Image (cartoon, rainbow, N blue to C red):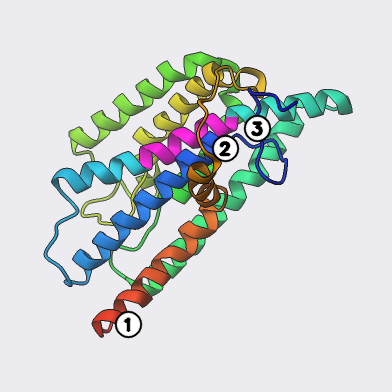
Amino acid sequence: MKNPYQLTDVNGRGRFEEIDMVRGIAILMMIIFHTLFDLYFFGLYPIDVTTGFWRYFAFTIASLFLLIVGISLIISHARAVQNISKDNESESIKILLKYFKRGAGIFGCGLLVTVATWFYLGEGFVIFGILHLIGLSIILAPFFFRFKKNNVLIGVLCIIIGIVLTSSGMNGSIFSLWLGIPPAPFYSVDYTPLFPWFGVVLIGMGIGEQLYPNGKRSFSMPNVPEKLISPFAFLGRHSLIIYLIHQPILITILHIFTGVPLFG
């Protein structure tokens, strides 16, 4: 009999489909926003996505992604500890290496975005965007697992620090912008610094401790039809590759339908 508190995907890898589903919804929201952003950026439609509703819509997308990163880290850590205990190896070193490798891989994908946007955009290219932040957050996560639910409070503190840095108007350098202290003037189409955004990951980790203690779901799932969940869960399971390829695809589609030269 299937355990009602452990919903696996079609490959039986022990994934929680509600997490994949929320991540998939965030991916869909991101595609919608970036479509509108491209229309605005290339002057194809007079819609300003940098202020008002669409600005907060973008913040919501980033927050959803980062909350899910934090929750997923808690589940992953719980399972890693169980596996390490069976192997009788040093837990701290093994876990540090695991998350360093994973985080470095994501950060490397962020560097690919940096190079691609530098060649394509020039001014406003991505120096420290959401993939850079996620990669660094994964590397830092092992130092915060011990705080468990208290990560919510630490996360709120990180957000407050970020708000203070932003409101202070402090000017930094290219070497401090990853912290949330950019040089002046500075513009990037995707800027997601450690402060305040790492705070959202930490809040996700604190929430994850509550919802998925020891890597297991602590709540009952409603009976939702699989055909309603599957499309979003599929997007969520392939979120990284979708993130990397969706903009070139969107730009190509806009070029085909508008005839406007969008490739420089």
Mark 2 or 3, nearer chain start = 2
Q: What is the crowding at mark 3: few (fewer than 14 residues within 10 Å), some, or many (at least 20)?
A: some
Task: Give the residue type that dot 3 points to.
Answer: Ser
Task: Give the residue type that dot 2 points to.
Answer: Glu
The one nearer the camera, 66 or 89, is 66
Query: What residue is shown at x 17% (from left), y 44% (from top)?
Result: 53
Alpha carbon distance from label 2 to label 3: 15 Å
Residue 174 place in picture, x, y as percent: 36, 52
Q: Is residue 129 above or below residue 56?
A: below
Mark 3 or 1, nearer chain start = 3
The one nearer the camera, 19 or 136, is 19
Q: What is the crowding at mark 1: few (fewer than 14 residues within 10 Å), some, or many (at least 20)?
A: few
The residue tagged 1 is: 256
Q: Is residue 67 above or below residue 245?
A: above
Residue 55 marker: none
Task: Tell us which disc is closer to us: 2 or 1.
Answer: 2
Alpha carbon distance from label 3 to label 1: 42 Å
Q: Which residues are magenta?
A: 62-73
Asked whether residue 115 is drawn in magenta, I would say: no
The residue tagged 3 is: 76
Can residue 262 be seen here? The reply is no
Asked whether residue 70 is drawn in magenta, I would say: yes
The residue tagged 2 is: 17
Residue 44 place in picture, x, y as percent: 18, 72
Task: Give the residue type that dot 1 points to.
Answer: Ile
Kindly state the secondary structure of the residue where label 3 is placed.
helix
Query: What residue is shown at x 26% (from left), y 33% (from top)?
Result: 165
Can residue 239 be seen here? The reply is yes
Residue 63 place in picture, x, y as percent: 37, 37
Query: What residue is shown at x 47% (from left), y 50% (from top)?
Result: 131
